[in-house]
Image (spheres, rainbow, N blue to C red):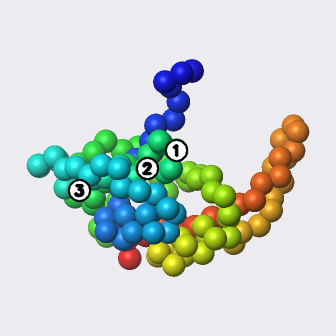
Amino acid sequence: MSGRGFHHVAIRAADFDATIKFYTQGLGCTVHYEFSVPGRIDRAAFLDAGDGRFIEVFGPGSSVQAEGRRRRPDEEATEGALLHFCLRVAEVEAAYARALAAGATARIAPRMASLAGEPPADVHIAFVTGPTAR
């Protein structure tokens, strides 16, 4: 598997600057590379999650292939193909607090949970939602 594996997940930001703030100040990512493509991608950035894997953020005016269809301005936000993604952190409570301070919405406060697999796995988790269109 050398040289293979997960590289990045791509998301569309309703508010590009708020989203970059959330992932950098709230979750500790760093901006690795910013780019645009005239007439196609208004703003975009690769954010390093800290291990050489990336979150690619596209601005709201970008025309990029997506799963499902893009929401019309008069529609409520709906779920798409991406349900969530998980970042590994050293301290869940501290990461959760930083994310909230950077504009996240609380979903599930830090807690221990047991995943009922074989064997069962105990995990320390928290869930937040990043900036969205208002």
Residue closest to the eye, 95 or 61: 95
Question: What residue sits right under mark 1 in the picture?
Answer: 51
Instruction: Classify the position of the C terminus by image quarter.
Output: bottom left
Mark linked to residue 43: 3
Q: Amino acid at mark 3?
A: Arg
The numbered mark, 3 or 1, whose residue comes first in the sequence reads 3
Is 84 placed left or right of 109 in the picture?
Answer: left
Q: Can you tell which mark lies on residue 48? A: 2
Q: Secondary structure at mark 3?
A: strand
> How far separated are the C-alphas under marks 3 and 2?
17 Å
Does residue 75 appear in the picture of this structure? Answer: no
| Element type where label 2 sits in the image | strand
Q: Amino acid at mark 2?
A: Asp
For label 1, the SS is loop
Cα gap from disc 3 to disc 1, whole angstroms: 23 Å
CA gap between label 1 and label 2 equals 7 Å
